[in-house]
Image: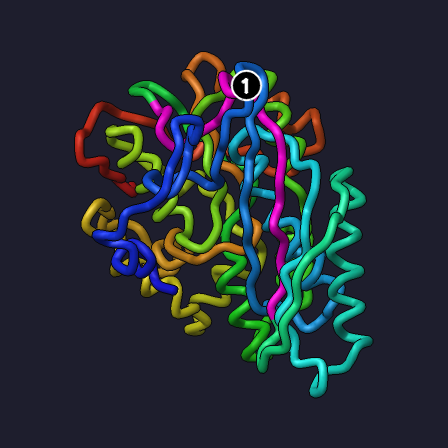
Amino acid sequence: MSPGDLDQALCGIEIPSDPNVLTGMLGFEDAGVYRLDDATALVQTIDFFTPIVDDPRIFGRAAAANSLSDVYAMGGKPLTAMNVVCFPIKKMGVRVLRRILEGGLDILKEAGVALVGGHSVEDDEPKYGLSVTGLVHPGRIMTNSMLHPGDRLILTKAIGTGAIATAIKGSLASEPAVESMVRSICALNRSASEVAARFGVRACTDVTGFGLAGHLVEMARASRCRVRLESKDVPILSGALEAVSVGMIPAGTHANRKFFTSWITTSKVISPEVSDLIFDPQTSGGLVLGVPSDSAGKLVGALIAEGVEIAAEIGGVIGPDEQGHVEIT
């Protein structure tokens, strides 16, 4: 769906809630959080998508890592997962389905998450993902709405997965580009989340379908602040610039730009290719962490020390803004 479609569909509909719902349908958060008691809250999320690579096992790994990411983005620890499977079993056969599920299990084992069930339906197009449940302390939740003026923004993965996936479909992706994308989409955000929690980070989102620009808009709007993104500092996957330069731009890029442009000002000096990648829809992207400026360098160092390959300072919060706005320079 395009950004905003679900909001329009739900407009005017009463949504059931509960005083213990700490984050839910009415915000821009990555997952729902329900308080059980003063020390424990459930984190719940679900995500699934169609294949972006030809290898079924890699698809399963990427889909599982992507599903777990929302729990990590809330500062939580995922505990259990349930498979969500849509699959044309008569056309593609059991072997392909098995490989997808094996890929998902690879990631669940790496994350220490138990598979407790799932649901499958026959469908013309394969889709796979997980419903995930985790735990977080109610007082240590990381959310979109906790940015403050003076905070710096740290990104923990390079962008460009959407463009490279489109190039793969067009048989125009180089081997290094495919390798860089696969490495990124299969990497868990667990270490980045755990380091952020140790630093007391409270502002966080993960970068997925709305692209870096769209998710920064959500943070800016939720936090009622003005964010500046410094495009020269944004890490880009190998091969992504080449992909967009030859027109390998996913439809989601255009949808993101159209929907979020009301909250974004873009400098004229930014190249069209870099601009496209900033709006590029990501699969299993990194975390954006908001931290006080005096902690940014230490956080970057700690992330790298814990094996997070990318930890880049990409901008900051330049002031309050009731409407929420992002300046891309």
Residue displayed at 54% across by 45% down = 45
Q: What's the residue at 75%, 48% (across, down)?
A: 115
> Horizontally, is 323 left or right of 19 in the view?
left
- Seen from this angle, which residue lies furthest bottom? 91
Q: Amino acid at mark 1?
A: Asp
Q: Is residue 180 visible?
A: no
Asked which quadrant contains residue 225, the reply is: top left
Image quarter in which the C terminus is found: top left
Where is residue 238? Give x, y as percent. Answer: 58, 56
Which residue is at a point 29% across and 43% down the rendered structure image?
Answer: 328
Residue situated in front as seen by the camera: 7 or 169: 7
Q: Quadrant of residue 301?
A: top right
Does residue 6 belong to the magenta stretch?
A: no
Nearer to the camera, 125 or 83: 83
Which residue shows up at 50% across the image and 62% down it? 162
To which quarter of the image does residue 145 belong?
top left
- Numbered circles on residues, count: 1
Which residue is at the far top?
A: 294
Report whether residue 316 is seen: yes
- Comparing 28 with 115, the one in front is 115
Q: Disc 1 on helix, strand or loop? A: strand
* Residue 153 falls left or right of residue 48: left
Q: Position of residue 289 (x, y in %)?
A: 47, 30
Q: Nearer the viewer, residue 267 or 116?
A: 116
Give x and y (percent) for residue 275: 34, 55
**Can you identify the residue that label 1 sits on?**
37
Q: Position of residue 110 (x, y in %)?
A: 78, 42
Q: Which residues are magenta?
A: 127-147
> In the rendered image of this protein, does residue 263 appear above or below residue 118?
above
59 vs 190: above or below: below
